[in-house]
Image (tube, helix red, strand yellow):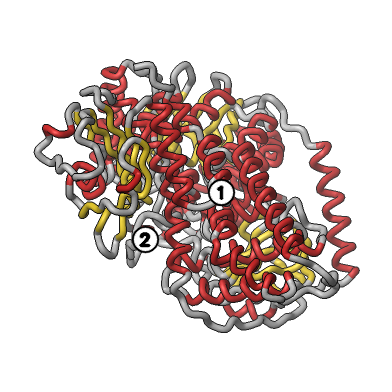
Amino acid sequence: MGKANVNMICDIAELSSLFEKSSSLDDFLQAAVSVVAYHMQAAVCSIYIYDDKTRDLTLRATQGLSLDAVGQVKLRLGQGLAGLSLKELRAIREARGSLSPKYQPVSGIDEEKYQAFLAVPIRRGLTRVGVLVVQDPEPDYFDKKDEQALGAIAAQLAAVIENATLLQELHRRDAVKPQEPAGAKMIKGRPASGGIAQGRATFIISGRGGSFQTPAGVPDGLTVKDFDLALERTEQQLKDLQRQADEELSDVAQLIFSAHLLILADDEFSGEIRRRIEKGSPPAEAIVDLVNRYIQIFSASSNPRLQEKVHDLKDLGHRLLENLIGGGRVQGDYSGQIIVADMLLPSDILKLATEKAEGFIVQGGVTSHNAIICRSLQKPMVMIDPQQFELFCESCEMLMDGNQGTIYVNPSQEVLREYAEHEKTLQELEATAQVCDVTSTEDGTRIHMFANINLLSDLKPAIASHAEGIGLYRSEFPFIIRNAFPSEEEQYRVYSRIVESMEGREVTFRTLDIGGDKVLSYQGEVEEANPFLGLRAIRFSLLHKDIFSEQLRAFLRAGAGGNTRIMFPLIASLDDFLEARDVVYSCMRELDERGVPYNRDTKIGIMVELPSAVVLIEDLAREVDFMSIGTNDLIQYMLAVDRTNDQVSKLYLSHHPAILRAIERVISVAKNHGKDVSICGDIAMDPKMIPFLIGAGITKLSLPSRRAYEIQQAISGVNAKKAAAVARRMLACSRVSEVEALLDTQTK
């Protein structure tokens, strides 16, 4: 048919461009249908938006049907082919739509002459948003690739549509009065991501937006024209930030500033500010008053996703004021500021980091996904208790130490000088620290060091640290940060970048590992009394095999010409593994039928992190191609200790005798069966545990690149033969204190 390549229609840059040029959601949707119709050479493209309260679909944009039908044509959920697509959350493709028993003609929209029909649901996770439909007079015009392309674009549309819907809801909300926090001098929190940051406190508190005040020194005589210029500059800055995010964090930065731009374009926001100025209000005062009103409305909303947008409003308010009165922060609204928040989503952290926030102080325990993202972005994070919020004050000067979990409010010159000297020493050490190409023990035993990566931005340090490959790619982060499940095409692009960057070196993709403390904001309201023991990791994937298969196909395709492996997390039984492996084989057969190239030699393995897997390790070893010991979860589940719970965290011990014996058993069985075995988790970057691991037979470690030099140095000081003897003594210990005594002896 000569249609454009799938990549063209899925190009996020093109969608971003459409969004930038649109003044409203309807303009954006109309532009989107025009572009989709053009690329697919389809006579018709239409978008229907779903209202969950009325359970109706409304035609909101079309190219090819009667424009008079926009806003008038409504379908019930399940009505017609479009309604059925959304009800069952699946694509529907018909060679002749009018011959389908589910076809329901709509009079007055001129669709009678179109035969070929293709509809894909627009969804945010499992939440229904709308339907994207294409039609053409030629029967059987659309194929499987068209279906994949529409699915990819629908996933991107979902985020913009959701933000616009939230904006509509906000106009119906009442206001509440925010409260102001107090201040103090020094606070002890819990470290989550290392590093030092200095700056002013900026609050992002649910239900308490932190009201604006008209800044001092506002020039006299500012006019509507000055406001319009500030509006224009603000819009351009946000577009520049989005482009920068797309370039640097293309795997996760999908339209992250769409809410900002939609609010800015909303006539009830910027239009109301302009009207107030025209009626005589000073421009700065008009901005402050309306932003405060919106902050109160957002904060008071019963919709948690609307509450999440409070800091988007604060961001816009700051930007508008800076651009109006000539402030200094034009390249990043949060430069020189430390974020103090009661809750942050991973997408919030990404957005704020892009806007140059210096660090994060957040309420609660250390949630692994937020901490991991901060480490990847090299931003310090400290966790604090709810009552400690009263010790901060808005705009107070702070210095935070993410390594120790210490926060200084209005730090003394002595503290600032001490940290400045510390930072200088660290920089000098980093400048001289060089990771060697080859890692060996003192007596010549070769140890292979692989990198853990979470975002594409982790690839550069992995390569710089001479990683021998990627030992663990945590594939969940593009899922966690986005507003909807990424499509197969979107995932394929991300995974391909990783394989290409490694240039033939081994890459291990771990399938989606969500649940526990890693949740999807769009997964729906799923309450679990014990989320770490609930629907997570491979259990989620096997329950949602459509999502699982999309990811597996993307892994397989990205591996074409490369050296790739697929690893399943949280395997509890041989049945789990065999069922998951069968899905891989099914995906291979499907790719063969489609004639799509993929890595036929993809190795399939497991992460050993459950006690049941340790017990069944002999049975598993006979079936798997490789194993990786995931020590973080293994310790948690074997010792029944929630590692994010401060009350029991001291019981979370990597050197517990049961843990040591479990690790040694897995290594021994893997080697007896000739299967590759590696280790990852915090234990792999603990210098004092390195002798035990080497002594127990580990020759392959997977760890963050930033720890590579330190661990390589620790390895070079180990004598493998002596380490084996020490490991045997540690394995014979039955008490934690006995193991600790041996660890103390070898570090002296």
Residue under numbered circle 1: 682
Relative image position of residue 571 (x, y in whole percent): 33, 43
Does residue 613 appear anywhere in the picture?
no
Q: In the displayed structure, would residue 51 be above or below residue 713?
A: below
Quadrant the N terminus occupies = top left
Please tell me how crowded label 1 is: few (under 14), some (14-19), or many (20+) other residues with Cα within 10 Å.
Answer: some
Q: Residue at x 55, y 76 (%)?
A: 296
Image marks 2 and 1: residues in contact by CB distance under 8 Å: no
Q: Residue at x 27, y 38 (%)?
A: 119
Relative image position of residue 723 (x, y in whole percent): 60, 38
Badge 1 amino acid? Asp
Tell me if 326 is positioned left or right of 658 in this view.
right
Relative image position of residue 342 (x, y in whole percent): 56, 70
Q: In the displayed structure, would residue 700 be above or below residue 155?
A: above
In front of the other: 307 or 223: 223
Splitting the image into 4 quarters, where does residue 304 fall? bottom left
Mark 2 vs mark 1: give the one in front. 2
Relative image position of residue 39 (x, y in whole percent): 42, 27
Question: Which disc number belongs to residue 487?
Answer: none
Q: Residue at x 42, y 73 (%)?
A: 302
Splitting the image into 4 quarters, where does residue 739 fall? bottom right
**Element class at badge 1:** helix
Query: Whole-Å distance between the Cαs marked 2 and 1?
Result: 22 Å
Please tell me how crowded label 2 is: few (under 14), some (14-19), or many (20+) other residues with Cα within 10 Å.
Answer: some
Question: Which disc number belongs to residue 531?
Answer: 2
Q: Residue furthest left?
A: 101
Badge 2 amino acid? Pro
Does residue 386 appear anywhere in the picture?
yes
**Element class at badge 2:** helix
